[in-house]
Amino acid sequence: MSRPARYRHLGLFLAFAVSIAWSAKIHATERAVDLSGEWSFRLDPEDRGRVERWYDTALPDRIQLPGMLQAQAYGDPPGPESQWLAGIGLKRANDSLFAPYWTRENFRSPFFLTPPRHYVGPAWYQREVTIPEDWQGDHIVLFLERVHWQSTLWIDDREVGSQNSLATPHVYDLSEYLTPGKHRLTISVDNRYLIPVGKSAHSISDETQGNWNGIVGRMELRRRPPVWIDDVQVYPDVAQHAVEVEITLGNRTGVSGHGQLLLAARAHAAQADSAPAEQFRALEISVRWDADGLRQRVRYSLDGRAKFWDEFHPVLYDLTVELKTQDRGEGTYHDVETVTFGLRQLEVRGTQFVLNGRPIFLRGTLECCIFPREGHPPTDVESWKRILSVARSYGLNHLRFHSWCPPEAAFVAADEMGFYYQVECSCWASFGNGEPQDAFVYAEAARIRRTYGNHPSFLLMVASNEPGGPSVAKRDAFLTKWVETQKAADPRRCYSAGSGWPQLPANQYHVTPAPRLQAWGPLQLNKPGQTWLDYREFIAKAGIPVVSHEIGQWCAYPNVVSEPEKYTGFFRGSNVEVFRDILQRKGLYDQAADFIRASGRFQVILYKQEIEAALRTPGMAGFQLLDLHDFPGQGTAPVGVLDAFWESKGYCSPGEYRRFCNSTVPLARLKKFVWTNQETLEFQLDLAHYGPEDLRDAVLKWELCQENPEPRVIAAGQTAPRDYPTGQLTEGSVQSVDLRNVPAPAVLRLKVCLENSDVANDWKIWVYPAEVSTEVPDQIALATDPHTAWTFAQEGRTVLFIPERKWIGGDTLGTFQPIFWNRITFPTQKVHMVGILCNPEHPALKDFPTDFHADWQWQELLDACTPMVLDGLARDLRPIVQAIDDWCEARKLGLLWEARVGNGRLLVCSMDVLHDLSTRVVARQLRSSLIRYMLSENFRPAVTVTEEQWQTLWRKPRLLETLGAKATADSFQPGYEPSLAIDGDPQTMWHTAWDPVAAPLPHEIIVDLGQPVLMAGMKVLPRQDNNPNGRIAEFAVFLSDDGQAWGDAIVRGTWDGRAIERVIRFPQSIRARFLKLVALKEIRGQPFTSIAEIDIIPADQR
């Protein structure tokens, strides 16, 4: 449709500006008619409206638009039978724990926020409009800013069409439908699950914004002349201080024509101050169009005054395009369109993003379409500026919109504030099988590019969160083509196939979960804490920019104290209400504020570790947190230092967060956090600098300080002046401090700052004595099993009880690493803890300096602990060191506690302070502190424990233990003998040999029960250490009376890779002495087999 153009510069911009102003004024009152207000309305739960021609009759009810029907008392009261659009968050919907809340009479969803009403289906909206005579022949469209989900439009009794975008306005051309006079406008909005974009996709899910029905934002009839400016796309050329402008003209006259396009740019109106706005020379071109219109490329040159757009200088310009047309003497048409753009250019150089020639680092968090007050994404700019202001105050410059795309206002706010966006095409889906979502993700991408493409903040785009497919090959082939299509269509941003995966050669960048501290990353949190290592090998191997996917997900305790009362808008905070109720029923609500604060401070420590690991990696492109703020769906994931309202939870200020998350961050590389006073502390000082310009002759200053009992500086120093280029990590020199003069035990703080600036960071370091006495004196009786400990206490002795793990009940794994996401979405994870709560002033910890929460010195102890469930003891017993339990179970978990038994005194420590003390510096220091406490007059336990209460603490022996069963196997690795599969300890396991070579499958384990037993089945627990090696995929079970003659298998079956206990039911009860489990296949095709525990099911439990 393009035509040759004649270019002519206009010297007098003023005359052109007047022309634009006059044209805009002419259309100011006529170009848009606001349709907001009262509409007629009717619900259509049985989907009868189309068949019964509701569009041709008046609808009986009334509703306000823009708005949601559920917010206006339409729909049903929510309940367990409601058709919830939810995925992984409902895994425990039938759990007895939540039964009191998952009822019609007392419905409070613990899995996501609860709307006031629930409705799924079509809903009909209707009103009359009157079209004036002078609109005859004009181009008229209906503009609906955000519709959820599919709209179908009728004018009078004529169907116009349907639209289903979740990301962009629904715009209908009504030029052929709206003649002068009165018309009935009817819209059916259908929020059923029409296209499988993924039930957990945040564009639609009840677990995030909610599956609302309605229309929000601007609702307008828009009038343009018969030849009009349909679209303007601006493509910056930073090197030449110019833009390529693609102008699309629409034409409904049916004939060709000609006219002029006038282009002029000036400083963005919202950024202009009282001085005259900066203006650039105007450009006029002659154009011709045919009966279908015109698509024209025009090069418009700015001059050297034009400034680039980025996070530090978000300079914007308004480009006004005026069309003056003369339609062969039949009349003159004027149309004006103004678009805002930023002069910016994004490139990929090696493994980094480069914006306007400067490498950038994305410090991002997710925006998961969570708006508790509104119930839908806000469509006003100020709401988005508030969110972005909060994010920036915590040092961020980037938002990722997880499986959704925000409305126009979000982009406007980011443009003006200098924020970088990654948007996604409304999907968390599977692709490549020819299903409707395949076509949808292409169409949605095109709509998003056209609608929001001019926004400089729109930096990145992916198809879907964590995409799946019928097979890896089909998925990857489909997404490769999708990426290539986007790159060819619009080069203004970078594209990737998906957030999380796959890493395709077509990708311009990867968003991958590998470089993060979860168990599958190279810097695993289950290894000793340090700040020395980084992800450089992974980044170099990738070869293109890598943004780490959803880092963090470290939980704190939900804010059950003050958050429930904040839900005064659309949603009810039913989840935190439920968790508060559970805590109150368990008698622990008085500790709620302490749980929140202690787990929260631990959460901050882990996020600092996570973010610094990314910043100290040379060439890394950025990270996307999950999250800076809480996620109230999918079972509730309190993973942020902010709540779901983007408001502080009170345990981390923006200033503290910016110390380790900012454009410029000092970094200290430490090989460990725990030292002795016979060592030399070594650390390397680096600087991650992604500021607006290089730092010249900069100096890093450091101090090693002791803060308690008296503040003092142990050592200090500074680096030689040097330049720090922006856009990179600059690695520095190694500093050292002799620790022999430090009075151990001590907590030191290493402080580093950039001279003459507010840029600073710090790290805690623990220094313990190289030698400390851990001998238990005669005055104290040491016990490791419950019977002996109780006997000693009954005798009136002072008892240090360090129970072996195999005795402790509750099946609760103790770890330094807190719960991942939550135990509703991931109920099989054995981690129950979100840190600890302790009393630093308790005399038991006098020689073990600590804060009230977990920190890196606790890692050695918590990774070797077994929390004890103290619910059966007196309510007023409070542990000295308390593990903070999962908020669903809310048990009182003790790691260190004391009690009186008759005249005896007990100090119980279920952290391992018994083994390998020569190498476990922290454990021996705690043990020494406990012994000193027990010898002091301060050891006076206040709470008494009865024998009945005592028995509630211990694990009941498994049947195999009672029988004295023995186990043999065809293969085992030393240290992983078959006996460990029947020892009652889920943390030990049998594992077949891997060194020097692994024997091939099948593998078998035989259990000799010692006597014939009538069995109904058996239980098998896979290994519990988060390592899938050896988990069984296919098995067979055999029984025998003599261990020689086995006969045919009585059961065969398959398992997936989950680490949950498996129950095998026999066809009928069978009496036998020998049981054999044969592993035929392993879940990943490896030659190993591993089992944590085996037990039998006696016939009387069938």
Image: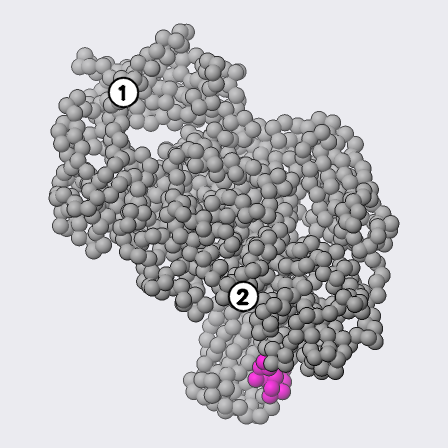
Relative to 252, is 791 above or below?
below
Q: Position of residue 228 (x, y in %)?
A: 27, 23
> Looking at this view, is 907 or 280 the one in front?
907
> Looking at this view, is 1010 or 667 the one in front?
667
Q: Position of residue 988 (x, y in %)?
A: 64, 72
Give me the residue at 14% from left, 27% from top: 180
The residue at which mark 1 appears reads as 27
Looking at the picture, which amino acid does disc 1 mark? His
Q: Which residues are magenta?
A: 955-973
Q: Is residue 969 magenta?
A: yes
Q: Is residue 425 magenta?
A: no
Q: Position of residue 893 (x, y in %)?
A: 60, 67
Whole-Å distance between the Cαs marked 2 and 1?
67 Å
Q: Is residue 617 visible?
A: no
Q: Residues within 10 Å of mark 1 (few under 14, many from 20)?
A: some
Relative to 200, is 381 above or below?
above
Locate residue 642 relative to residue 985 in the image: left or right: left
Looking at the picture, which amino acid does disc 2 mark? Gly
Relative to 307, is 112 above or below?
below
Q: Secondary structure at mark 1?
A: helix
Q: Secondary structure at mark 2?
A: loop
